[in-house]
Image (tube, rainbow, N blue to C red):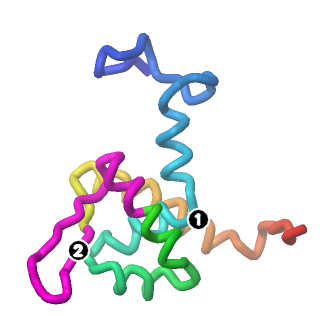
Amino acid sequence: MRCESGKHDHHDVYAALCPCRDVLDLLANKWSALAIGALENGPQRFGELQRHLQGVSPKVLTQTLRRLEQAGFLDRTIYPAVPLHVEYALTPLGHSVTIPLGLLREWVEQHLDDIKVPSPD
């Protein structure tokens, strides 16, 4: 696919040095995909997200949210209050990726019984 930014001749996720791989790595991450899904219905505070994403540690959730914000998928808004009130919301770019990620989540749920999930070593 031709690069619209003009920074590269074309995008090819199969090419070793293509920056697409970094984005694919971010979005294919379990916690990223789940955080984006959790924010589809509107902004949430950190605690709400952590409760929604059962099993995620505060450290991993913080790292995930920072990476998504840096990539432009999330906005972080700080409201002056005591204690501080911080909300996370999807940007237009974040909303644009909810459809493919939502389809992937649905596919996994529908086909889980057909998949031979490897056991941890």
Residue nearest the viewer, comparing 37 with 114:
37
- Front residue of 86 and 92: 86
Residue at the farthest right position: 121
Q: Amino acid at mark 1?
A: Trp
Which residue is identified by label 1? 107
**Farthest front residue?**
82
Task: Look at 46% across and 62% down and name the residue there.
Answer: 63
Between 16 and 105, the one lying in front of the other is 16
In this view, which residue lies farthest toward the top?
9
- Circle nearer the N terminus (2, 1): 2
Q: Quadrant of the C terminus?
A: bottom right
User: Residue 84: horizontal and vertical position, in percent?
Assistant: 19, 81
Q: Is residue 4 left or right of residue 15?
A: left
**Left or right: 64 in relation to 15:** left
Image quarter (top left, top right, bottom left or bottom right) of the N terminus: top left
Residue at disc 2, secondary structure: strand
Mark 2 is on which residue type? Glu
Dot 2 crowding, Cα within 10 Å, few <14, some 14–19, many 20+: some
93 in relation to 102, above or below: above
Residue at 27 percent of width and 78 percent of height? 44
Badge 1 marks a residue whose secondary structure is helix
Where is residue 3? Give x, y as percent: 37, 19
Residue 83 magenta: yes
Residue for point 86% across, 71% down: 119
Vertical side of 43 occupied by 14: above or below: above
Specify start and end residues of the magenta stretch as a single range. 65-88
Q: Position of residue 64 (x, y in %)?
A: 46, 62
Asked which quadrant contains residue 91, the reply is bottom left
Q: Mark 2 against mark 1, which lies toward the viewer?
A: 2
Residue 43 in picture, x, y percent from top left: 23, 74
Residue assigned mark 2: 87
